[in-house]
Image: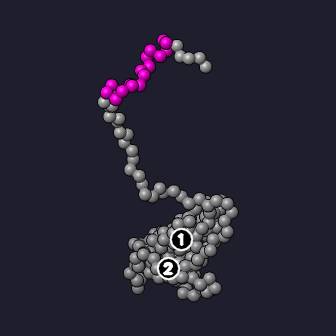
Amino acid sequence: MSEPTPELTEGVSSPPETATETAPAAPTPKVRSRPRKAYTGQTFVPKGRLPEPARKWFLVDATGLTVGRLASQIAPILMGKHHPRYTTFMDMGDGVIVINAEKVVFRGDKWNQKLYRRHTGYPGGLREIKARDLLAKFPTRILQHAIVGMLPKTKLGRQMAKKLRVYAGPNHPHQAQRPERLVLDTLRAPSRT
């Protein structure tokens, strides 16, 4: 390359040759930065092919528990949200066995007011049943309907729902899974008499 011409170098100042010729430097403005966070909040994303997670089974006694409050604590366990390895697009949840489903309670007068609706698929095929009648006919469906309704409405949600077992009485055939008793922080309602 060629050397710079004199007209290009006129505007450029040359560095001072002695320390006495330097002018005091202007203070540089400080750039405000955000405070650093200790926790970044990053989501765990598994890499590669993962083995099937080791699933635990929990046993829940539904005696005297409110349906919605109980369901809102069982659904995250089926999804796996209680694990630090929770991933939204994988089934990382554990299994739940619910016993004494016939002893759940509703607040207020929902036993007479709450309706469960379904449709047969034919014209005029809307069927309604009160909660009181559904409990007498199918005691496990009230709790199962509430819990499955809180799971995702996808193929993954249907896979999560298969890990739920609801029984009307105190007996269950899942001793081989060695379920751990799960104590929920749901308040027990006053007993029905």
Report crowding for label 1: few under 14, some 14 to 19, many 20 or more residues within 10 A (C-alpha).
some
The quarter of the picture where residue 106 lies is bottom left
Write the residue at 64% across / 85% down.
176
**Figure check: 187 above or below 44:** below
Q: Nearer the viewer, residue 103 or 84?
A: 84
Check residue 11 for magenta coloring: yes
What type is the residue that disc 1 sits on? Ile
Write the residue at 65% across / 62% down.
155
Q: Secondary structure at mark 1?
A: helix
Q: Nearer the viewer, residue 30 or 142?
A: 30
Q: Secondary structure at mark 2?
A: loop
Q: Which residue is mark 2?
A: 182
Q: What label sits on residue 77 in the rendered view?
A: 1
What type is the residue that disc 2 sits on? Leu
Q: Nearer the viewer, residue 132 or 11?
A: 11
Percent x, y of residue 82: 51, 69
Give the position of the N terminus as an image quadrant: top right
Percent x, y of residue 190: 38, 81
Bounds of the magenta span? 6-21
